[in-house]
Amino acid sequence: MTATTGASATRRLILKGAASVALIGLGNLPFAAERARAAANDKYPEQAFRQKSEADAIKALYGKTAEPSDKIKVDAPEIAENGAVVPISVTTTLEKVSSISFLVTENPNALAASYLIPEGTIPSVANRLKMAKTTKLVAIVEADGKLYSAVKEVKVTVGGCGG
Amino acid sequence: MASTIRVRATSSGDITEVQALIQHPMDSGFVKDAKGEIIPPHFIQQLKFEHDGKDVFVADWGPAVSKDPYVKFSFKGGKKGDDLRISWVDNKGASDTTTAKVG
C-alpha cells in the first residue's frame, strides 16, 4: 500500500475533484479530511485568533470562504448599551454542522469564539461577547464541509475594550 | 477551593441543555489599569464538555469573550444522573475541571 503522505495527497485530489463521490465511495476517511475544523479537534486555533480582519480569520480557521445563508439565525441586540457584555446566539437549520464561529469585525482581532459541534450536539450556541464599537457580527457555520455565513449589525453605545 | 465553573445541565426527552458560567477575568490585553499600564491578556482558550467519554462541545475562545463567560448549548443522548465533565485551560496554562450531574 502507499505511504501515508501519498494517501493523503490522493485524498485531497479526490476531494477537490468530486467531494460527494468521494464521500459515498470511500467511506469515513475522506469525510474526516473534509471537515477541516473538526479534524483539528483538540488544537486551539491560535493563528486564527491573531488575525485582524474577518476575512483573514476565516481563512486561517477554515482555509476557505463562506457563502451567505438564510438558514442561519443570529440573535443579537440591535443596540448594545454595554459593549463589554453583548449576548449573542446563533442557531441554524443546516444539517451536518461541525462548527459555529463568531466574528466581530470591528474588534482588534475579528475572531471571538469558535465552537466545535460534534455529531449529536444541536447546532445552536449562546454566549456573551465584547464589542469595541458599533460593528457587524458575522456567524460562520460549517456544515457538510461547506461554509455559510450570516451577518447582523450591532450598535454599541459604550465600547467593550475599556478605552 | 471552590470551582470556577458553574454548570446547569437539564435533560428533557432525549435532549440535554447545558448552561455554564465560569469565573475568569478574560483580560483582552487592550485595557489599561488605573496607572495607565496595559493589563496583559489573560483569557480562557479552550473549554470542553465531555459526556460518556466523548466531547459533546468544545469552545475555542479569544479575548473577545466577555468576563465571567457564559455559554449555552444542547446535545442529544444525556440522561438524568449522567456525569458531564467540564474543563478549561487559559493562555497562561491555568486550568480547572469539574463534574456536573445531568438533572
Image (spheres, coloured by chain):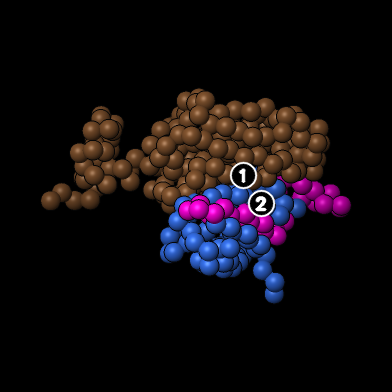
Q: Residue at x 50, y 53 (%)?
A: B13
Q: Which of the chains bears the disc numbered 2?
A: B
Q: Which mark is residue A43?
A: none
Q: Is residue A151 left or right of residue A147?
A: right
Residue B20, located in which quarter of the rendered image? bottom right
User: Residue A96 or A44: which is nearer the viewer?
Assistant: A96
Q: Which residues are magenta?
A: B12-38
Q: Determine crowd level at label 1: few under 14, some 14-19, many 20+ residues with C-alpha closer than 10 A.
A: some
Q: How many marks?
A: 2
Residue B94 appears in the figure:
yes
Q: Provide the secondary structure element on which disc 1 rests.
A: strand
Chain B: give its colour. Answer: blue
* Amino acid tagged 2: Tyr
Pointer 1 residue: A126
- Chain A hue? brown
Q: Nearer the viewer, residue B28 or A97?
A: A97
Q: Is residue B95 left or right of residue A8?
A: right
Q: Quadrant of the C terminus of chain B?
A: bottom right
- Which residue is at the front of the view, B38 or A89? A89
Do the numbered discs 1 and 2 sit on residues whose CB atoms are within 8 Å? Answer: yes
Question: Could you say where residue A111 lies in the image, as x and y percent from the top left?
Answer: 59, 39
Farthest residue to the bottom: give it.
Answer: B1
A135, above or below A39, in the image = above
Q: Point out residue B80 in the picture as x, y percentages from the top left corner.
A: 53, 64
Coordinates of residue A8 in the picture (x, y in percent): 25, 44
In the rendered structure, find residue B70 and report the number of the disc placed on it: 2
